[in-house]
Amino acid sequence: MSTETVPTSEQADIIEAFLKGLVDAFGIEAGVGRQEVDDELLEVLVEAPDLGLLIGPKGQTLTAIQEIARTVLQRKATGVYQGRVRIDIGGYRNRRRAALERFAQSVAEQVSASGKQKVLEPMNPADRKVVHDTINEIDGVATSSEGTEPFRRVVIRPLK
């Protein structure tokens, strides 16, 4: 393995090319671009009116595409990766994050009111992180994760 640094922009170039080929193979008219989220994260975006096929139920196809893109990247650019590149299709990740934040706040209110912990359904690591981060901002409740992948879940408990 090479010890050369692979900049985020080069990683994004490879992933963009992969996604353009993917949408072409599906016969989808879509725009593929990128957006800098912060110094360490670039998001490669696929935009078109109807991308449900590429998102899949609960984002499962999007997650699979992210994993395949990671494999493509590892084969085309060996070295030490600087920063991260994430894929978002049709704005799904932002909508999902907002929905999870609302859900977590609602469950936190229920836990605070009842004084009883709630165990959520199994979630992928990214979704669990959103729930943990949201709950960490709310007084009177705390979170932990339990179980093993792919059945790992968040537990929200009162701090009393």
Image: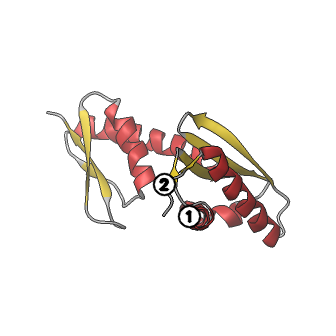
* Residue located at (71% from left, 63% from top): 18
- Looking at the picture, how far across and down is residue 74, in whole percent? 56, 64
Corner quadrant of residue 130: top left
Q: Earlier in the sequence, mark 1 or mark 2?
A: 2
**Closest to the observer: 70 or 25?**
70
Query: For mark 1, does the 10 Å Cα neighbourhood hold few (<14), some (14 to 19), or many (20 or more) residues?
Result: some
For marks 1 and 2, give the one nearer the viewer: 2
**What colour scheme was applied to this rendering of the protein?**
secondary structure
**Secondary structure at numbered mark 2:** loop
**Secondary structure at numbered mark 1:** helix
Judge from the rendering whether residue 87 lies leftward or rightward of residue 135; answer left or right.
right
* Residue located at (69% from left, 62% from top): 52
Judge from the rendering whether residue 45 lies leftward or rightward of residue 130; answer left or right.
right
- Hey, which residue is sitting farthest bottom in the picture? 25
Q: Which quarter of the rendering shows the C terminus?
A: top left
Corner quadrant of residue 15: bottom right
Kind of residue sitting beneath label 2: Thr
Q: Are marks 1 and 2 in contact (CB under 8 Å)?
A: no
Q: What number of labels is visible? A: 2
Which residue is the site of mark 2?
3
- Looking at the picture, how far across and down is residue 96, in whole percent? 55, 48
Kind of residue sitting beneath label 1: Gln
- Looking at the picture, how far across and down is residue 9, in whole percent? 66, 45
**Closest to the observer: 29 or 104?**
29
- Hey, which residue is sitting farthest left in the picture? 160
Q: Which label number is shown at residue 74? A: 1
Judge from the rendering whether residue 148 lies leftward or rightward of residue 66; answer left or right.
left
* Residue located at (20% from left, 44% from top): 116
- Residue 145 in sight here: yes
- Looking at the picture, how far across and down is residue 65, in whole percent? 61, 65
